[in-house]
Amino acid sequence: MALHQLIQRLLLLGVRFESLPRLQEPTPPARLAPLIESIAPEHRTFDLRAVHFGHRYRSGYWAIYVLSAFAVLFAVVPLALGWDDSRHILHPFVGLWEVGEVLVIATVGAIYWLGHRRDWQGQWLQARTTAELTWYLPLVAPLVDFQGDTAVGDRANWYRSVYDPGEPLPSASEVETLCRRHDAMARKNLQDCWSDPTFVAHYAHWTIDILEGQRRYHLHVAQKQHALLSRVHGLNSWLFGLTAVGASMHLMMHTLWLSLVTTFFPALGASLHGALAQSEAYRLSVTSERLVTELHGAIARIRRTIPGIESLDAASIQEIKITIQAAVAQILKEHQDWHMLVRPHHLPLG
């Protein structure tokens, strides 16, 4: 478990999320099985890389914020508890707290330096984009026009072959390479796929299963981010409330340990708020909620077209093709929005 996951799990102790029945693994049409099997190792490589750098980047900024609060704690404890007095029994150990403070600050600096030098964020964004585009390639492949003598170069990127080149589609050179490598296979298996009623019906049901999986994923993201916002907001209310009480008590009693309350508590609250702001929890929850609604609508539209497929009604086939194309476009747009949301954030605080 990565550090950012551990911190969030601690913050969400006691929170119960909506439990949904487990979905079965979507079964793709037989025509797409070879393509999926061939692309799977590439997708696995990109996905593991995205997970690795995603954990490093997110754990990095959570560590920077939280450790900054604990640097304040190490600095104020000896003063707040009176250990800086040479007559105090624990005075000989004051140096340990100073060393601890230096080590914490050095750790923050090392995380900051490593994160920028090795570009954790950039590598995460690039790998995640490539993994997402690779994952949806088999879903997009039937939408590509493999009829006639169209040159492979015109289909170098299946996404740009299907969608308007003017749209802000995410791009990845690795995906273009995969498209070129699998063009012959896709052309052979999918050239007349829309004339096969069995394929069309199976493709529609498979798409529904994939979209339902995405809908549930974004539902969980929305619930988790909303719960995280609520929990951190509640915790900060307590921290700043206790700070206010401590500051008020200072007016009546001059006790050094109250300095611990009035310095560490607001520092910890500010750190949690800063980490949550950098994670864009609010925007993620709003975006995921919107996508849940859009995917639900796309699934409903595809389901409405399926009964007309068996009769090879051209209008129904065209409708389901357009509906699936639009559903994939929604997912691509969401990923592009997420990319633009995260890109401005780097490990520097603020």
Image (tube, helix red, strand yellow):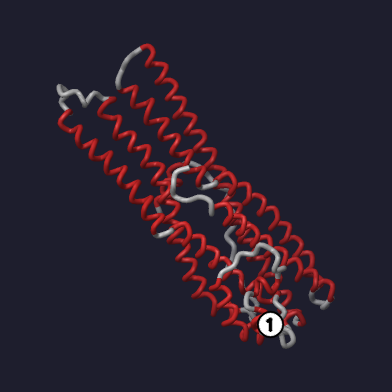
Q: Quadrant of residue 339?
A: bottom right
Image coordinates of residue 126 in percent, x first then y, are 51, 64
Q: Residue at x 82, y 78 (%)?
A: 312
Comparing 205 with 248, the one in front is 248
On screen, residue 128 versus residue 291, left or right, reads left
On screen, residue 306 versus residue 257, left or right, reads right
Q: Residue at x 27, y 41 (%)?
A: 102
Disc 1 crowd, CA 10 A, few/some/many (<14, 14-19, 20+): many
Image coordinates of residue 171 in percent, x first then y, are 59, 67
**In the image, what residue type sits under mark 1?**
Leu
In the image, residue 310 sits, relative to residue 208, either above or below, namely below
In the image, residue 103 sits, relative to residue 142, either above or below, namely above
On screen, residue 6 versus residue 25, left or right, reads left
Q: Residue at x 24, y 23 (%)?
A: 82
Image coordinates of residue 293 in percent, x first then y, are 69, 53
Q: Residue at x 26, y 25 (%)?
A: 81
Can residue 317 be seen from the camera position used here? yes
Label total for image: 1
**Residue extending furthest toward the top:** 252
Image coordinates of residue 73 in percent, x first then y, are 32, 33
SS at mark 1?
Answer: helix
Comparing 154 with 266, the one in front is 154
Can residue 34 be seen from the camera position used here? no
On screen, residue 105 versus residue 35, left or right, reads left
Q: Looking at the rendering, in which quadrant would you find the N terminus?
A: bottom left
Q: Which residue is mark 1?
A: 190
